[in-house]
Amino acid sequence: MRALIATLLWAIAGPSLAAEIVVTNGDTLQLDGTIYRLEGIDAPEIDQMCLDQTGDVWSCGVAVRDRLSAHIGSRAVRCEDKGPDPIYKHRRIAVCSIENEATTLNEWLVREGWAIKFEPSAKGRYSADEADARENSRGLWKGCFAEPRELRGWNRNGARLVGGGCHAGHENRIRDKLFRVDTPMPPGCPIKAKLALRAVGYEGIYHLPRCGSYQRLKRAQRWFCSEQDALAEGFRKALTCR
């Protein structure tokens, strides 16, 4: 009886273990209705484009999400909740692991080159994993990509381009490929978004499928899977939406 009580108390107080796992982004998981963003790392946004080792454009955001989903497979995942996400209010911050594996998913993504460390929250924990992935040209490091935070801020001209495929002298051509005005829609993410240059910087506007402007907007710079994500990144709803 004491052993049973101890087990129940541990299950209540300990990290969450869920059977229903949905990978929504390269660094975001949904476990039984709770959305966790992996602490200390930054993976490509779901609509982000990268260059491969030959210089061709590929949908790295979708690919990284699928890589993480395949790595987890049908195995159970445990997440240690670190508190609310200060930016994405509908998410929690967490360190997650596959059951009975010592390497966390946070570490695995950086080590395999599918994410980069995100300071200051990483606190230097993933520096060695990132350096190893970069030196061995794993994952994204084979080609060329912009840091995800630069895409979120649409810092086209100032973004640091990283990876073995970033060839000097071709920066403008590379930026045109990575910061596209006609980004293809990722599966399951139908919210179109456009950036407009104002006197004080860019203003982002998103368009839902029901908006009157949705069909008129032929080219989208960004795509979102939910309104919460669009709002968290500073976009506002189009005035044609009711």
Image (spheres, rainbow, N blue to C red):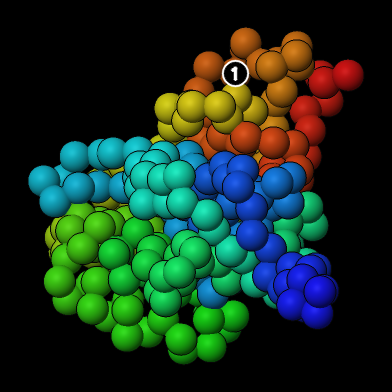
Task: Give the vertical position of 58 relative to 116 (above or below).
Answer: above
**Percent x, y for residue 143?**
20, 55
**Percent x, y for residue 19?**
60, 47
Q: Quadrant of residue 65?
A: top left
Q: For this rendering, which residue is in front, 157 or 63?
A: 63
Q: Residue at x 43, y 27 (%)?
A: 184
Secondary structure category for the residue under label 1: loop
- Looking at the image, the residue that sits furthest to the right is 242
Residue that numbered label 1 is attached to? 217
Q: Quadrant of residue 95?
A: bottom right
Q: Name the image quarter holding the C terminus.
A: top right
Q: Residue at x 64, y 53 (%)?
A: 18
- Looking at the image, the residue that sits furthest to the bottom is 124
**Percent x, y for residue 137?**
17, 66
- Looking at the image, the residue that sits furthest to the front is 1
Q: For this rendering, which residue is in front, 55 or 109?
A: 109
Q: For this rendering, which residue is in front, 38 or 76?
A: 76
**At label 1, which amino acid type do we have?**
Leu
Q: For this rendering, which residue is in front, 21 or 166?
A: 21
**Percent x, y for residue 140?**
27, 57
Q: Is residue 148 left or right of residue 8?
A: left
Picture mark count:
1
Q: Is residue 180 left or right of residue 13?
A: left
Residue 131 is at least partly visible in this image: yes
Q: Name the image quarter holding the N terminus.
A: bottom right
Mark 1 packing: few (<14 Cα in 10 Å), some, or many (20+)?
A: few
Task: Give the vertical position of 240 relative to 78 (above or below).
Answer: above
Q: Residue at x 74, y 37 (%)?
A: 227
